[in-house]
Each structure stands twice: as C-alpha cells, then as structure tokens.
Amino acid sequence: MTLPYRTEPRTWDVIVAGGGTAGAIAGIAAARAGAHVLVVEALGSLGGTGTNAWVTPLMRNVAGGQNLNRGLTDELKARLRARGDGATDKGGNDNWFNPEGLKVVLEDLLLEAGGEVLYHTQVVMPVLEGERIEALVLHNKGGLQAFRAAVFIDATGDADVVVRAGAPFQAGDEDGLHQAMSLRFTLAGVDTARLCAFLNGHGQPQASSSFLHFWMVWGRGSSLEPLFREAVTAGVLKERDGDYFQGFSVPGRPGEISFNCPRIRADLNDGANPWQLSAAQTDGRAAIDRLTAFCRRFLPGCEAAYIGTVAPMVGVRETRRIVGEYTLTLEDILDCRRFEDAICRNHYPVDIHSVKGGARLLHERDGSAPYFAPDAYHEIPYRALVPRGLRNVLVPGRAASSTFEAQSAIRVQQNCHTMGEAAGIAAAWAARDGSGDVRVVDIAALQAEMRRLGGNV
C-alpha cells in the first residue's frame, strides 16, 4: 500500500510536538544539552498558554517566600525584564510579563541554542514500531510528511501524540467533566490611575497603578459584586458573566488590562473536542463584548477603553492526562510527598475552575494538612512524565500523569516550565545514548544537572 505521506529526509534527535508552555522550554533545554531538536507548533509563535492564550501574569509558586521554579524560568524572567516586558512589584512578585515579549524571548532562546522550529504545522498521527514511535506524521503547507526522531516529547497539552499511539489516558473528573475554559482579552485605553483610585476606595486596595489586580466571583465577598448585580439587572451582563472575573496590569503595555475571563459556558468544557473548542471561541467573543460594555459603564477609568487583544487560542485548563509510570494524587499533594525521582517542586494550591459551581475547591489555601504550612511543598516525579506502553516519549506539562484534583495544582505555567526543562534534558540524553529509551535515564544525574543549571530539585 502506498502511504499518503512522504518521509522528510532529515532526522532529529528530539522532536517536540507543541511549542507551548512546556514544549518551548523542553526544546530549549534539549538543544542546550546537545540534541538536534525540532519544535513543531500549530500556531505562529512559541509559548502557548502564556502567549497565544494570553495567560498573564504567571501564578506564584513559592514556599517559605522563595520561588520553587528556577533554572530556565529564572532566565526567562530576566530576559523579559531586560526588554521591558517583565516586572517585579513591591511585594517581590516577579511574575508580571507581556505575552508579546514572551514570544520573542522564547524564540530567541530556542534559536540561540541551535534548535529549529516549524510553525503552522499540525500533528496528525505517530508511526509506531512496537513500543517506540519512529516518526510523527505532520500536516502543513507542504502536505503530509513523516518526521523521524530518536525521542519525542508530547507537549501538545492534550496528549495528542500519546493518545493517538494507543496509550492509556484519563480525562475529566469522575463524571467526565473538565475544568472551565476561558477566552482571555485585554482592554486598552484605560486610565489606570483613575481605575486604581476607584479600586482603592472600593474595597480592593492596590499597591500601584502599574500592578493592578482586581476580581469578582459570585458569593466570594468581592466588593465589585453589587456592580455586577446592577449590570445583570440592567441587561448589560448575563448572570454567568459573574462566575469569574479578574483583571491584571501588563508590563510594557501602559493603559492596558488583561482579563482572566470570560469563562466559557458550562456545557463547553472539553478542549480536546474540536466542536466545543470552536464554539468556545464564539461564545467567548460574545461575552467579551458584554464585559467591555460593563467596564466602560461601571469602572471609572475605563470609559474610553477598547478591546486591545482577543487571545487567538482558548485558555484550556485540563483535558486528557496520560496514565504514567506514576500518577500524582491529591493525597501526595496534601501530604507533601517526596520522590526519589523528583524533577519539580510545587506549592500552588488545588485550583479547580469547576463547571459544577461551588461543588469543587477553588484556591483553598487553609487547612490542617502538611501542605498548608507556608514553607511546605510536594514534588512531581519524573515517572509522571513517562507514559505507559511507550519507550521513547515524555509528556511534560498539564497532560502529565495525575488525578483530576492533583492536575489542578500542577498545571500552572511555571511548573510546566520545570517539567519541560527536565523532559528536554532527559530526551537529549536518551537520544545520545542510542537507545532513545526515556526509562533508562540516570535520574540522579538529571537532578544534579538541573541543580547545576539553577534548578530547585
């Protein structure tokens, strides 16, 4: 039978499927470790959630007042600050960044390391030989092509490669429902000084007009809730527009606010379903118009604001999760479990944006479990990146092996950076030894290398 694709004549040591939050860092790390690397990305820039979904700022992940994600994450922040696209507030939070600047920084880091990137390219299917992936069939303007490598990193966020290879996976909670999706946007033309003054006098004190953060969630005690109720009564907003509302300043973009909303309607929660993903885009755009009208009418300083950016990519928090050699659990998190093969530390809380309303935890930060101590953290093991049934594949990022509850704590961008860095180094080493087997990587050596590079493992 003639196959419907041609084989690319070149071969790589490592191919990274997906140049998003974990994938871009994995590609950089693998290239720096000496591998011949290709990063394949469906859109036209690296960074995924942090750039094309406009998820800014990074969520803090600290224990005892110290950042837990270091290494390449530190370098990323330093480069962003150097170009005016990153900032640190008076409280020491160094996680503020401009998504457009992040695109440039990630691409520069990859190319400087000798890595290659192929944009506007979709993963179609893996070509298997036993428990090994021999090639990925990709589609772009060149048609269908098979690209070969010794090791593959599935950083699609949805475990597309692993699932299409027939490996086991889980998805959603016990009812098959996923976390809520969002479509982020920005308002430009905001008088941030006036908005800051209003918030300071309206129960949401701000440190500076350069680092605004304001929010409203029904029933959570936000001082903005009466305004949202008035807007719903006036027909400016729908009831569900108040399910989650959050705004942030953006370094390098004065007069612009990034919104971690609107939340997509509850029946559209599966980001791995193409019909739901498409409908989420249109549902989100309609909600953005409503929220823009609300801000102009009810928030001083926003009267002349206009939509600056609508994210080209829907913000997806959770879809498929691989079944790995180890599955991280909620108990592991609450008990601050340590692992001999640890590659990442986390103290971000269980944070489930549930489509079931109040039936799930949301930023629970107090309790009696060891995890709630200010200097506590748990670890993520390397085995959670290793899918069952495949020998030469790693899966860093939000699709790593975890339960639904545990995934909500480890999915944030900085953890994805660290998992990606570990996966990149491990993949380069597995390719170098000739076997391509990610299970035989010397974990103690990997941990030592991550520490040498500034990591915190």
Image: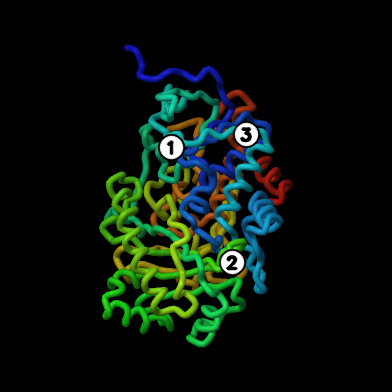
For marks 1 and 3, the one nearer the N-term is: 3
| In this rendering, position of residue 30 left or right of residue 216 | right
Task: Tell me where residue 183 appears, x and y as whole percent.
Answer: 39, 58
For badge 2, the amino acid type reads Pro
What residue is drawn where x is 54% and y is 30%?
Answer: 151
For marks 3 and 2, the one nearer the N-term is: 3
Mark 3 lies on a secondary structure that is loop
> How far is the residue under mark 1 from the one under mark 3?
28 Å
For badge 1, the amino acid type reads Arg
> Quick one: 288 or 402, which is closer to the camera?
288
Disc 1 to disc 3: CB gap under 8 Å: no
Disc 3 to disc 2: CB gap under 8 Å: no
Mark 2 lies on a secondary structure that is loop
Q: Residues within 10 Å of mark 1 (few under 14, many from 20)?
A: many
The count of marks equals 3
> How far is the residue under mark 3 from the one under mark 2?
33 Å
| In this rendering, position of residue 252 left or right of residue 294 | right
| Dot label at residue 254 | 2
| Dot label at residue 388 | 1
| Dot label at residue 227 | none
Q: Quadrant of residue 250?
A: bottom right
Q: Quadrant of residue 131?
A: top left
> Quick one: 408 or 123, which is closer to the camera?
123
- Please name which of the two marks, 2 or 1, marks the residue nearer to the observer: 2
| Dot label at residue 115 | 3
> Quick one: 393 or 17, which is closer to the camera?
17
What residue is drawn where x is 53% and y is 63%?
Answer: 348
